[in-house]
Amino acid sequence: MALSEKICPYPAHRMDFIDVPTVLKVSALFNAMAALAWLLLAQLFRIAPRAGQLMAAGHLLRIATQDCGDCMAGWPALLRQAVPEFGQLACMLLLLLALRRMLRNRRHPRDIAWLGGLGALAITAGLASGSGLAPQLAGTASVALLAALAVREVLRGVSRHLTPVVTALTTLPFATLAVVSLAHAAELLLVPGWGDHVLSGALPSPARAVLGFVITASITLSLIALMIWRLVTRIQHLTHRDSLTGALNRRAFEQALAEAQAQLRRGHGFAVAMIDIDHFKRINDEHGHLAGDAALQRCVRIWQAGLREVDRLGRLGGEEFCALLPLDNPANLADAAAVAERLRASLAAEPLHWKGAELRLSASFGVALPVLGDAAGDVGLARADAELYRAKGEGRNRVCVAPDLSGAVAA
C-alpha cells in the first residue's frame, strides 16, 4: 500500500512492451477498489471496523500522493518533492496502525508515533537543506524501518497460531518492501545523479512500475488474509465458547476431555475438578438474573486468572463448571487439589459489588483422577461429581477429593 514506484532499485532491461502509464492507472484503480472493499468490510459487515477505515484511508492517500503524478504538474518543485515523501510515510503509518488493530495488539502505538515523527522531521530537514537527495533518503529509510516493524508485528501476532510456511508467506510482502527500500537508499547514495533523475518527474521504468504494483497488491492481499484469519478465529471462538462467560461450552469441553483420555495411556495424566457456585439460585431470586449473569462472569474471570494456559475451564450448564487440569505426574492428585483450593479461596476473597450490594460468592469443588479405558471420561466426571455433592453436603465452599485409583480400568 505504501510503496512508491520509485523505490525499486532494479533498472528496466527488456520490458519495453509494458506501457507504464497503463500500469500506473491499474495501480490507482486497484487502490480505489481496495479502499472501497475495506470500507464495506468496516461499515457494512463490522469486521475490524477501525482497521478497515485505516486501510481505506491509506489506499486513498496513496492514490493522491503516489499514483497521481500528473496531478502535481505545475506545482512548485519543493511541493512536488514533499508530497510523495510525506504521503509515503503517512501510508506506512496507517498500515501499521491497521495491522495492530487486526492482530488485536493493544500496545500503545508510541513506537509507531516516534518512528513517524522522526521520519517526518528528517524529511523536513532534508527539504529545508535544499538538497534533492536528503529528503528522499529520509523517506526511504523511514519506509524501511516501518516495514521492518510490520514484519515484527505479524510475527508476534500469528507465529504461535499459524504454520511457519503460512507465517512466512504473510510476512513476505512487508519484508520485501523493507529490503527494496534499503536497496533504493543504497542506489541513491551510490549511483551518481540518481536523486536528480527521480526529481526530474520522469515516469518510472516498466520494471519499477510493475514491481511497485506487485508489492502493493501483495501487502493488501496479505492484510486481507489476516482479516479472514481473524474472522475464522472469531467463528471458532463462538463455536467453542459459552457466549456469556467465555468458558468452553459443554461440547468443546467434552471434546477436550476425550482428547485428554486418549493421551492417558501415554503417561499424560490429568485431573478433573467439578465446580458448583454455592446458593446461585438465591442470587437470581434476590437480585435478578442480571446479577446472576454478573456473578457467573466474575467467577469465570477469577478462575481463568488462576489457571495455567494448558488448563481448560468449561461451563457444563447453569452454575456448574468443570476444570481439566493436566498433571506432570499422572498420579499427583495433591497438585490438582491445590489448584482447586486456590480457585476456591480466590473466589471467596473477592465479593461482587452489585448495585450497592456486596454479594459474597463461593463455590464447592470435587476433584478426581480419570481411569484408563474410559474413552469419554465419564467415570472420572462421575467420581468428581460425587465429591462435589459431598462438599455441598458438608457445608459448601470447600474442596473434596476422590480416593486415588491409579491404574484402575473402567469396566
Image (tube, rainbow, N blue to C red):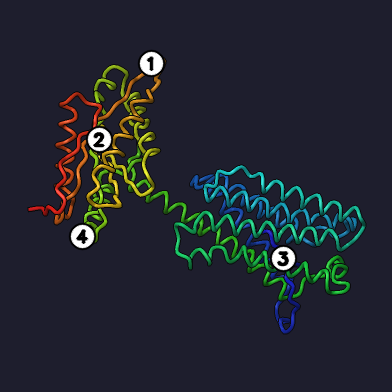
Query: Percent from the top left, x then y, of residue 184?
Result: 76, 69
Write down the residue under mark 1: 357
- As displayed, is residue 77 above or below residue 286? below
SS state under label 1: strand
SS state under label 4: loop
Task: Pick out the residue farthest to the left.
Answer: 411
Query: Percent from the top left, x then y, of residue 222?
Result: 55, 61
Marks 3 and 1: CB-CB under 8 Å?
no
Crowd around label 1: few <14 · some 14–19 · many ≥20 (10 Å): few
Q: Amino acid at mark 2?
A: Ile
Q: Amino acid at mark 3?
A: Ser
CA gap between label 4 and label 2 equals 26 Å
Crowd around label 2: few <14 · some 14–19 · many ≥20 (10 Å): many
Which of labels 4 and 2 is toward the front?
4
Marks 4 and 2: CB-CB under 8 Å?
no
Write down the residue under mark 3: 181
Crowd around label 4: few <14 · some 14–19 · many ≥20 (10 Å): few
Q: Give the residue at x 18% y 28%.
A: 392
Q: Give the residue at x 81% y 61%.
A: 136
- As displayed, is residue 62 above or below residue 238? below
Write down the residue under mark 4: 265
Mark 2 and mark 3 lie on one chain; the one further toward the N terminus is 3
SS state under label 3: helix
Mark 3 and mark 1 lie on one chain; the one further toward the N terminus is 3
Write down the residue under mark 2: 275
Q: Quadrant of the N terminus?
A: bottom right
Q: Amino acid at mark 4?
A: Arg
Answer with left or right where residue 142 lies relative to residue 236.
right
Total marks placed = 4
